[in-house]
Every structure is written in C-alpha cells, then in structure tokens.
Image (tube, grey):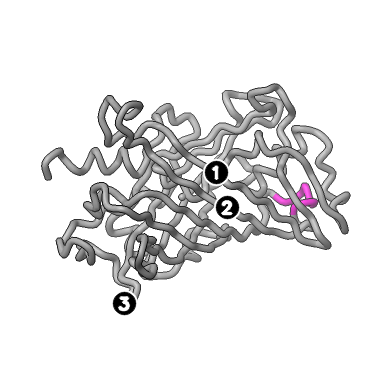
Amino acid sequence: MTHRLRPYAWWLAPVLLGLAGAGTAADLKLDTAQDNLAAARRIQCSTKDGEAVTWYWKGHAYSRVPGEADRQLFAVEGMNIRQCGPLNGATDGSFMMATREVLVYEDPKTGKVLETWENPWTGKQVKVVHVANDPVNQRIGATDRAGRPFRLPLEVIGGQWWMTATVPLFYRNPLAGDYQDYIGGKYHATEMFNFFGSVPELADSRRRSVGVSVGWVRMSGWLPWMEMGDRAGLIYFSTAGRKLDRWEDMPEAFRNEIKANYPLYLAPPPLDDPRPNETSWSYFKKVTPVGK
C-alpha cells in the first residue's frame, strides 16, 4: 500500500473524525476514545496482544500516459502480517501495530511472478524489484496532534459499516538529491482506501477480531525499477482484498512464493520493534547500487 507503498497501514484515522449513518449505528456504542480504539483493534488486528493477523489483496497496475490509451502493466498480489499490543505500556487503549508486507508484480496473462520486465516504451529489459517492506509499524494513540479524542471515521447504513480515507502524499524523495526544493523531484502520490464490515460483528465486544473487506487504489509516478526517468505519465493500482481468518487462507501459489522468497513474512515484527519503517523507495535504494 505512497512511496512507502503501505497499502494497509492506513492509520490517518485520528484526523478523520466522526460517526455517521443510520440503521444500527447506535449498536456500536463508540462514545469514548477507548471504545473507538478497541473497535479499531478489532478491525485492524486483534484485541488479543500478540495475535498474528494476515491481510491479503490482489488486482492490477495500469499506465496513464498523455495521448495514449491506458495499458495494463502487471497483475499485483500482496499480503500484510501484523500483531497489536499496548503502546509503551499504555492503559488508555493506545496500541502499537507491528507489521511487515509484501507485494509482487505478476504477468497479467499468466499470473507468474516477474523476475524481469520488458519496458514497452524504452524496449529495455529491466529487473523487477518487488515490495518487501519490513517493518511498516503504526502507533495509534488516544488523541490526535490537536488533542482531540480518537474517533473512527465510520459510516453506517443498515447492518454494514464502511470508512474511506484518501491520502495525498508529497514529500522528499529518498532517491533524489539535496536540491528537490529548487528543481523538483519530490515524491508525489495518492492512496485511496475503502474498508467494509458488519455492524453486529463490530458491536460485539466479545469478539477479538472482525471480518473486514478492503479496496485499495494508488497512483504515483513511475516505479523506480521501471527506469522511466522523467517520461510523462503515471502508474495506478486497483485492488481489493480482505482480512483473513488465518495465514493459510491465501492462495497456494502465493503462499509458496512467500515461503520460498520472503520467509520472514510468515510472522509479524515484535511489538517492541524500534526500527524505522521501510518503504518501497528506501528498499529499492538498498538493493540497487548507484549505476546499476
């Protein structure tokens, strides 16, 4: 899921306030920040400290170039494994969400994971760098930066809830130089998330975790490994997925890919993980020496 490509570590909820809707919305009883934090944990992971939870999604990536029809470039398939626990020993419901995630680029016709890709604009065969971000941790507190209580941005109709977050991103690019403020080159992207679930499930505080479906859309400049330079255009992703009951519910071929090439992603990072977050751009920088 940004240059972070953090499809499902989406926590901008503290700046999106309010509970709206009709039907059984009153059943949710989200009156306090603690109520909202507990519901957030049931949505994102589990209220049982240290219980591993897996999210899975798949879809396609497309090009958008002025003057030509959009092209389907890749199929994409991804997963995020996470666990939650109290944030720094907090007793107010604040929690740490420790996660790592993989997204792979596949041939849209065969579904096979790509090792190389022929760039249709340059004709060059390039090495594909898949997303392997470890960690992608989030810290969710009882208040936002303005001191307002944490609220989930839920909408409710009948027995279903949903929430939407649009996340514009514009900041310094770790692959660019020191003069981005003068000549450009900053990272520019937007991510769009939609989450859906059952009100009766979420209202049941006896549940440690609830079923959630998700849609994720992302648009940005070209991925660095595509070697597009400053060519006009962008890439956009359209995907959907869900929170799984268990890691083994992912498709067999994708599970085998993770086991063979990303075995670390069979489990989440520790809850006391002190490392800074990895991003797809910073990971690319690590694995791609200058001049290669």
The residues colored magenta run 202-207
Q: Amino acid at mark 2?
A: Phe
Task: Choose between 219 and 47: the one closer to the eye.
Answer: 219
Q: How many marks?
A: 3
Q: Amino acid at mark 1?
A: Val
Q: Residue at x 79, y 52 (%)?
A: 204
Rounded to the nearest angstrom, the CA distance separating label 2 from label 1 is 8 Å
Query: Height in image: 288 above or below 242?
Result: above
Residue 110 numbered mark, or none: 3
Residue 160 drawn at (x, y percent) = 76, 60
- Which residue was labeled with disc 1? 167
Q: Earlier in the sequence, mark 2 or mark 1?
A: 1
Rounded to the nearest angstrom, the CA distance separating label 3 from label 2 is 28 Å
Q: Amino acid at mark 3?
A: Thr
**What is the quadrant of residue 111 in the picture?**
bottom left
Q: Earlier in the sequence, mark 1 or mark 3?
A: 3
